[in-house]
């Protein structure tokens, strides 16, 4: 964790502020905070009201959003959330969210594996300098059949390799 606000979304959602659980009045303010943190950009109040309270009349939806934002402020989360229109996580705030950390690390791992794998594949493919036992024959049918099978197998490996290496 890198900040005083820790948002855990993988598994049961949990919000910790300086290591202590934050208890919001209802689940929607918690969902709103998680949404803003995961999205990472600002959203107009009207959009958030529709997203979280779309089953209510527009005026009631906006009122519910105001109550949810007040709940965030009342729980000392105003340093992390800009409640102006549009609403967003403050870019200067220090918060950590497990889903983003998970995504970042998985992407980095996949990227590094791809680079490493491509390099290894290039090295392996460089070993293939031509057909197996090229221009080499002995007059033994069993041996020649084995050579042909090996040639087919190695050719098929080469055909499986991406063309852009």
Image: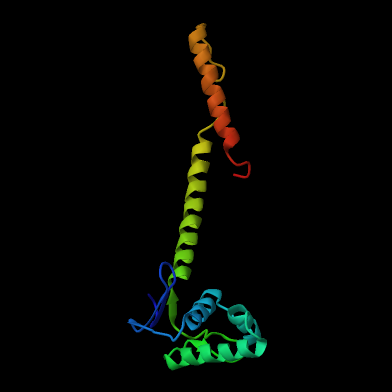
Furthest residue toward front = 56
Rendered view: 145 above or below 7: above
Report the side of 54 relative to 120 (left or right). right
Q: Position of residue 155 (x, y in %)?
A: 57, 28
Q: Position of residue 42 (x, y in %)?
A: 60, 82
Residue 42 visible within the image? no
Q: Position of residue 141 (x, y in %)?
A: 52, 7
Q: Nearer the viewer, residue 111 or 53?
A: 53
Q: Residue placed at 45% from the left, 58% from the top?
A: 109
Image quadrant in which the N terminus is located: bottom left
Q: Residue placed at 50% from the left, 92% from the top?
A: 70
Furthest residue toward left = 19
Residue 26 visible within the image? yes
Q: Nearer the viewer, residue 60 or 135?
A: 60
Q: Nearer the viewer, residue 79 or 152?
A: 79
Q: Residue placed at 57% from the left, 30% from the top?
A: 156
Rendered view: 141 above or below 19: above
Q: Nearer the viewer, residue 85 or 32?
A: 32
Q: Position of residue 132 (x, y in %)?
A: 53, 23
Q: Residue placed at 53% from the left, 32% from the top?
A: 128
Q: Which quadrant would residue 10 be assigned to in this image? A: bottom left
């Amino acid at each position: 964790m890198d900040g005083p606000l820790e948002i855990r979304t993988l598994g049961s959602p949990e919000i910790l502020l300086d290591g202590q659980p934050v208890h919001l009045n209802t689940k929607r303010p918690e969902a709103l905070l998680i949404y803003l943190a995961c999205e990472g950009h600002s959203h107009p109040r009207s959009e958030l009201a529709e997203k979280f309270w779309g089953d209510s009349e527009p005026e009631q939806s906006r009122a519910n959003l105001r109550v949810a934002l007040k709940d965030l402020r009342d729980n000392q989360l105003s340093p992390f959330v800009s409640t102006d229109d549009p609403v967003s996580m403050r870019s200067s705030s220090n918060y950590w969210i497990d889903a983003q950390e998970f995504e970042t690390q998985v992407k980095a791992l996949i990227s590094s594996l791809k680079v490493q794998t491509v390099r290894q594949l290039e090295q392996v493919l460089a070993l293939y300098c031509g057909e197996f036992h090229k221009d080499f024959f002995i007059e033994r049918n069993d041996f020649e059949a084995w050579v042909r099978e090996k040639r087919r197998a190695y050719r098929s490996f080469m055909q499986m390799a991406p063309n852009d290496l």
